[in-house]
Image: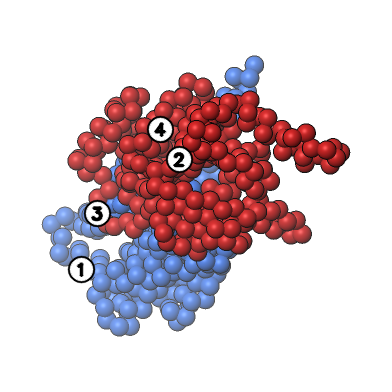
Amino acid sequence: MVALLVHSLEQGFAYGIAALGVFLTYRILDFPDLTVDGSFVTGAAIASLLLLQHGFDPFSVLALAFVSGVAVGCLTGILNTRFGITNLLAGVLTMIMLYSINLRIMGRPNLSYLRATTFKTVVEPALGFLGDYAILVFVGLLTLGVKLLLDTFLRTELGFALRATGDSESMITAQGVNTKTMKVMGLALSNGLVALSGALVAQYSGFADVNMGIGTIVAGLAAVIIGGTLLRSPRVGWMTTSVLLGSLVYRLAMGLALRYGYVIGFEASDLKLITALLVVAALVLPTLRERRRRRVSAC
Amino acid sequence: MLRLDGVSKTFQVGADRVDAIRGIDLELRQGEFLTVIGSNGAGKSTLLNLIAGSFLPTTGRVWLRDEDVTMVPAHRRARWIGRIVQNPLAGTAPSMTVAENLALASKRGRRTLRPALTRRTVRAFRERLSALGLGLEDRLQSRVGLLSGGQRQALTVLMSTLACPEILLLDEHTAALDPHNAQAITSLTRDFVGDLGLTTVMVTHNMEQAIDVGSHLVMMHKGEVIHELSGREKTGSTVEDLVQLFSCHHITDDELLLEPAC
């Protein structure tokens, strides 16, 4: 039971960085960005290539994965703002392009980290005094560090402009900000975080797979929405905290479902269905409640 | 300060052509206050959009501060232009707090990685807000979406003047408010314009307001300026005079009448 908890929390933090990326587009920019299903893998692919074939260390590949995600996000942003492709389609197009590109980077659909030096093999002996919690502590601190950096950015003038772009485009244009630039920047940052998360998850789970990104958007949304119902606040620091909290709760629920789900007939392959239904429920429930309230007040 | 040379604007949607503005010349010196009245579809809002850069003119040139800005995009012109529209929701970011909105408005143009809100700026905002006398200084940390329409519009007025623009564009900015709030926002606007010596263009449907406020008045109809009043001629006018002028032009439009009434 403790092992299940620890593993779920580790995953919650590792995928939490991707959830922060989804939060940035979905909540802050009001741009449902589907690129993330591809950029998650791109981060993993770039990290694997550099680590396995070019002898990079497991930490610098995380930073380089971030950079690759930034490039991918810019592509979606330019498709949307410069060429006027709608936001959903721009994301889907980039995602499809990335499927081929990711395969090119990796060379084959699956790469194993067996016998390779990952952050795990470095961290476990270095933080040996923490025993079974070494990985959790490392991943947790890394994710919190990323969160704090993101918070700081969102409190700068540039961060304010980004938030206002998603909130009231006419207002922020009147304040002298180019909203197109802001959107590209937001998408770049978001996909950078998602790619970093992909690289982290690949090392964590010991392999990179070309299909590992499927459902990143839905899992990210689940974290954002669960977190938003647990913790409501207009303050940036609390908002990102709620996203990470949502990610932890989500991974814990998934862990429990995988472990005990067979009791009620669940299989591992049902997880994506359950996740999507969870997101649908979270999106639909508030509108249903609103409708019922209106009906009551109408009488 | 502000000059339009033979500006026209034609909207073309498929086979439909709408001549929203047909050759307007306009010149305002610094500190002058122009009110614009006219029927629906006269091109009043289009005129403001052309000045702000939201639309590019089909023909003609736009000059701000002795510079030809005809091709300069809206977000660049925003450095010199403050703008308030009718909808109180459009001028503010609803899910951000009052303090955050003011921070956004206190700077125009390029944004940096400096912290947007410091203790010092919050204190300054508190002082500016308490000068409005609406109790907003106690709501700095409230989301703007929770404020009333009047409060939001008052905030918008403050925001539009915070970065010291030279030109202020008002598009029926009191039309969505109740009479009491509209009065308050009008006098607030007048104070700001007077204090900062702003060159102002105000579009309004309220003729009383149009006569009462400002140094110049133009009446627009079908994309053209059909009448101009200034100085004593303007202050001496009454609403009846304007209505009279209006109906004359409407009657001359009427093809059934061969002999115009005026």
Say which quarter of the image contains residue B15: bottom right
Q: Where does the image place residue A104, in percent across and percent down from the top left? A: 47, 80
- Mark 2 = which residue? B33
Mark 4 → mark 1, Cα distance in angstroms: 67 Å
- Mark 1 = which residue? A122
Q: Colour of chain A?
A: blue
Q: Are marks 3 and 4 in contact (CB under 8 Å)?
A: no
- The residue depicted at 43 percent of the width and 42 percent of the height is B32
Q: Where does the image place residue A43, in percent across and percent down from the top left? A: 38, 69
The answer to whether one can see residue A182 in this image is: no
Where is A43 relative to A50, above or below? above
Mark 3 → mark 4, Cα distance in angstroms: 33 Å
Indicate the chain on which mark 4 is placed: B
* Crowdedness near tag 2: few (<14), some (14–19) or many (≥20) residues, C-alpha within 10 Å: many
Q: Nearer the viewer, residue B24 or A209?
A: B24
Q: Looking at the picture, which amino acid does disc 2 mark?
A: Phe
* Crowdedness near tag 4: few (<14), some (14–19) or many (≥20) residues, C-alpha within 10 Å: some
Nearer-N-terminus badge (3/2): 2
Q: Are marks 4 and 1 in contact (CB under 8 Å)?
A: no
For the C terminus of chain B, the image quarter is top right
Indicate the chain on which mark 2 is placed: B
- Mark 4 = which residue? B190
Foreground mark, 2 or 4, reads: 2
